[in-house]
Image (cartoon, helix red, strand yellow):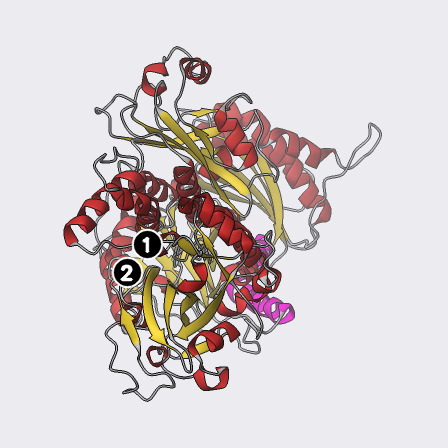
């Protein structure tokens, strides 16, 4: 507040008409003092200078206790202050020193008498408001000359006086005060301060409101009785009035007058208590239960919570007010009635819209609380009409109802229906204010939980879209995978696994890890995974594939590195062909003796380093052996040698398991329960079953058009031998077409024909021509193009790929059910 800013004191509503007329006749100047967390004065208004006689330049930076009228004062002048500690405390309210030294965390008020320099003893009324916020200010102290509030013929009781700031009064400094309030009240915007200033005169007591997350001082500790027994009696009455219970009728008049103010403080304490009990989790369901249980039975007897359908589903929803088509899910019902009374009539989980004539619709569309003092039979019938085959009227008729919106950022997320038993005091306007504040705080907590749920859902969807759907059975092998995000707050990462079908019944197995976390790493992972799939389909050797992947990473940028393990499994030859780019080695579990080992591979450099050669090795495997590939997040723990994790991986991978999924779970349990894991985990396990020689038939054909007829003959003969007579005609016809094309395009070498019986029937034809065939449109008079169209129409799948010696063209047929 700058020099010249004035504030005024006005009477509270309980003061009567006379006091109100005196307040309207003029304003009593207030001294405004702000005290920081060290107890030093950080603001000293011109009103404080006039009242206490100390210039601003001398007051700033001094201890407030030396300048303000506190209880327990020393004899006059003994402390060296300009006017000394010449204050006499009369016992009304806790001493100001209790607020100055931080012993009171709620607003307080009192009266003291002091002698200002060159003046007679004056009677001072003071109010102290704790300030909550990030700034250094801790306490706002307001003081007024009590004598200025007295009329010639009457005396205004201290308990009926409250400082008032109001824009709509004739107080000339109100506009300026609203503008300057943010300078002394932390975390307050100009708009908030203007709203507060305009409200105070209507409420009759000062309101200093900071945010939904801070404590909200509402009124000081008005008129504390001098005798302990009266204080205890009034406290009991205050709690009853504040929370809707019956109020004792034997209160003295002066205590009844104070009851309103003490009840307000009790409501403040109730709101602070509720705020501390909700929001302990970002789980939406748990948050709803916390809110419901915080208000029952202390504030209400029944609390039903409804949320928008999209909030429950963790989705976004369009802006704008809800309408009669908006679906609301009942997510919680808390009550004090006998168990089960509400469960059948209003079960949790039910979804419904609300008609426009209901108070619920009014609340959700206006975003304001709706108070129904008593639900009449007519209204009970109107509300019950939306419940098919269930009579809700006995549960609600005659009860007091308050409907409060749960909203955040001006968006209604849901609402709470609060009901009190008929014998309990009805909800009133003060309850409406309390319920609105409660709902506002709960709305922010729910919105945080909603946004977290929504973001988690988006991240999970993104991650799942980037991770491939792995077929559990490939040619000659079974595959199982697991993916675990590093943290719940970062479900998107750079770890991935993949499997790619290759010619010759082979399968490419891939595990990779882009260093880092978040969307950027996930985007890089998506690019690398797509590149691996594309190059694997070209049947590049493992070392060459990693070389090309490294070149691609260099072109994408130098800000990301990745590790990758690429293996090609040939089930017919019983061979693994593996290359490594800075990745942790895989584990091979031998089926013969159950022994596990880390494969000794050339490590290579991570993808993205550039200029480093990659090497591939071949490893002989037998049917039943298991290959385990994972990212380092599974074996690496902070503060622990990675060798410990690798040893645990080998040990757990060798553990007998009933299935591949059980084997993966065993590994995860062994390595994921040690604690401290922050990285993502990708795990791929393949059981290398192989393909028996009896299920493979091969022939070499000459470059002679007549070989097409021979191909059809040997295929028919072999299929009859395998008991696949139903496939003879189509398989023979398509094999002849592929051999005919190969004879036409091949050069000097012969043609290879192979049949493989596995989960499908695979037919492969290879030659030494590197040009891949293309499916063309063939007209009735065209000589070429009909062969591949025939293969495409009759086969389950077909394709082609280049090999080191030329190309392979293949097709598959589905085996008949046995």
Which secondary structure lies at badge 1? loop
Pointer 1 and pointer 2: residues touching (CB < 8 Å)? yes
Q: Position of residue 760 (x, y in %)?
A: 48, 35
Q: Closer to the camera, 32 or 160? A: 160
- Magenta region: which residues? 529-556
Q: Residue furthest top?
A: 389
Q: Residue furthest left?
A: 229
Q: What residue is disc 1 on?
A: 222
Residue 532 seen from this side: no
Q: What residue is disc 2 on?
A: 93
Count of numbered circles on the image: 2
Q: Position of residue 158 (x, y in %)?
A: 36, 56
* Quadrant housing residue 553: bottom right
Distance of label 1 from label 2 (alpha carbons)? 7 Å
Q: Main secondary structure of the magenta part?
A: helix
Label 1: how many Cα within 10 Å (few below 14, some 14–19, many 20+): many
Give the vertical position of 708 relative to 588 (above or below).
above
Asked if residue 226 lies left or right of residue 113, the reply is left
Residue 282 seen from this side: yes
Asked if residue 117 lies left or right of residue 781, the reply is left
Q: Position of residue 807 (x, y in %)?
A: 63, 52
Q: Closer to the camera, 105 or 461? A: 105
Q: Is residue 397 magenta?
A: no
Q: Closer to the camera, 449 or 782? A: 449
Query: Which circle's residue, 1 or 2, is located before the other in the chain?
Result: 2
Q: Position of residue 780 (x, y in %)?
A: 82, 27
């Amino acid at each position: 507040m700058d020099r010249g800013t004035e504030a005024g004191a006005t009477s509270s509503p309980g003061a009567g008409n006379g006091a109100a007329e005196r307040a309207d006749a003029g304003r009593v100047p207030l001294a405004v003092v702000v005290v920081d967390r060290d107890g030093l004065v950080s603001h000293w208004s011109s009103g404080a200078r006039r009242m206490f006689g100390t210039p601003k330049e001398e007051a700033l930076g001094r201890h407030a206790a030396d300048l303000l009228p506190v209880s327990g004062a020393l004899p006059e002048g003994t402390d060296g202050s300009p006017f000394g500690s010449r204050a006499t405390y009369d016992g009304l309210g806790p001493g100001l020193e209790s607020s100055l030294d931080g012993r009171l965390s709620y607003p307080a008020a009192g009266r003291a008498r002091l002698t200002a320099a060159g003046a007679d003893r004056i009677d001072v009324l003071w109010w102290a408001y704790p300030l909550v916020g990030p700034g250094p200010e801790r306490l706002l102290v307001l003081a007024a000359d009590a004598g200025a509030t007295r009329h010639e013929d009457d005396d205004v009781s201290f308990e009926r006086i409250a400082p008032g700031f109001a824009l709509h009064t004739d107080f000339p400094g109100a506009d300026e005060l609203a503008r300057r309030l943010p300078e002394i009240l932390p975390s307050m915007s100009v708009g908030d301060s203007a709203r507060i200033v305009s409200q105070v005169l209507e409420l009759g007591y000062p309101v200093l409101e900071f945010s939904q997350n801070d404590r909200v001082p509402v009124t000081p500790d008005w008129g504390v009785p001098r005798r302990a027994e009266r204080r205890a009696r009034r406290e009991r009455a205050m709690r009853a009035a504040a929370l809707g219970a019956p109020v004792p009728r034997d209160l003295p008049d002066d205590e009844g007058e104070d009851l309103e103010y003490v009840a307000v403080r009790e409501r403040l304490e109730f709101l602070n208590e509720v705020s501390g009990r909700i929001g302990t989790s970002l789980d939406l369901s748990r948050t709803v239960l916390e809110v419901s249980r915080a208000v029952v039975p202390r504030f209400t007897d029944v609390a039903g919570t409804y949320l928008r359908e999209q909030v429950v589903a963790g989705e976004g929803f369009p802006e704008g007010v809800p309408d009669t088509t908006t679906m609301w899910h009942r997510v919680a019902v808390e009550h004090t009635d006998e168990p089960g009374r509400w469960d059948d009539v209003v079960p949790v989980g039910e979804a419904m819209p609300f008609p426009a004539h209901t108070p619920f619709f009014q609340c959700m569309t206006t975003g304001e609380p709706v108070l129904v003092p008593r639900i009449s039979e007519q209204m009970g019938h109107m509300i019950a009409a939306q419940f098919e085959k269930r009579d809700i009227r006995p549960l609600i008729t005659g009860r007091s109802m308050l409907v409060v919106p749960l909203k955040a950022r001006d968006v209604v997320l849901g609402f709470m229906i609060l009901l009190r038993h008929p014998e309990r005091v009805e909800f009133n306007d003060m309850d409406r204010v309390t319920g609105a504040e409660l709902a506002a705080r709960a709305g922010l907590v729910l919105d945080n939980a909603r946004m977290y749920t929504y973001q988690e859902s988006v991240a999970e969807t993104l991650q799942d879209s980037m991770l491939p759907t792995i077929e559990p059975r490939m040619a000659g092998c079974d595959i199982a995978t697991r993916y675990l995000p590093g943290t719940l707050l970062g479900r998107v990462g750079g770890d991935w696994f993949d499997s790619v079908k290759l010619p010759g019944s082979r399968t490419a197995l891939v595990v990779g890890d882009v260093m880092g976390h978040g969307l950027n790493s996930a985007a890089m992972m998506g690019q690398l995974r797509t590149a691996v799939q594309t190059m694997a389909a070209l049947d590049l050797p493992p070392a060459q594939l990693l070389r090309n992947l490294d070149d691609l990473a260099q072109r994408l940028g130098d800000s990301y590195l990745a590790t990758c393990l690429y293996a090609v499994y040939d089930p017919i030859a019983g061979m693994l062909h593996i290359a490594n780019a800075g990745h942790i080695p895989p584990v091979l579990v031998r089926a013969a003796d159950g022994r596990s080992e880390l494969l000794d591979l050339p490590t290579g450099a991570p993808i993205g380093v550039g200029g480093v050669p990659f090497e591939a090795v071949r490893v002989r495997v037998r049917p039943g052996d298991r290959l385990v590939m994972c990212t380092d997040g599974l074996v690496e723990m902070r503060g622990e040698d990675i060798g410990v994790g690798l040893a645990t991986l080998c040990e757990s991978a060798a553990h007998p398991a009933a299935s591949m999924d059980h084997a993966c779970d065993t590994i995860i349990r062994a390595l994921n329960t040690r604690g401290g894991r922050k990285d993502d985990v990708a795990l791929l396990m393949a059981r290398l079953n192989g393909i028996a020689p009896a299920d493979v038939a091969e022939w070499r054909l000459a470059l002679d058009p007549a070989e097409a007829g021979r191909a059809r003959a040997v295929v028919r003969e072999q299929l009859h031998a395998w008991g696949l007579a139903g496939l003879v005609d189509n398989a023979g016809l398509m094999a002849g077409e592929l051999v005919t094309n190969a004879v036409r395009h091949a050069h000097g070498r012969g043609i290879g024909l192979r049949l493989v019986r596995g989960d499908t029937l695979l037919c492969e034809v290879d030659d030494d021509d590197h040009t891949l065939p293309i499916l063309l449109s063939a007209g009735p008079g065209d000589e070429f193009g009909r062969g591949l169209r025939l293969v495409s129409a009759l086969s389950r799948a077909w394709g082609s790929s280049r090999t080191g010696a030329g190309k392979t063209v293949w097709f598959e047929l589905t085996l008949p059910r046995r």
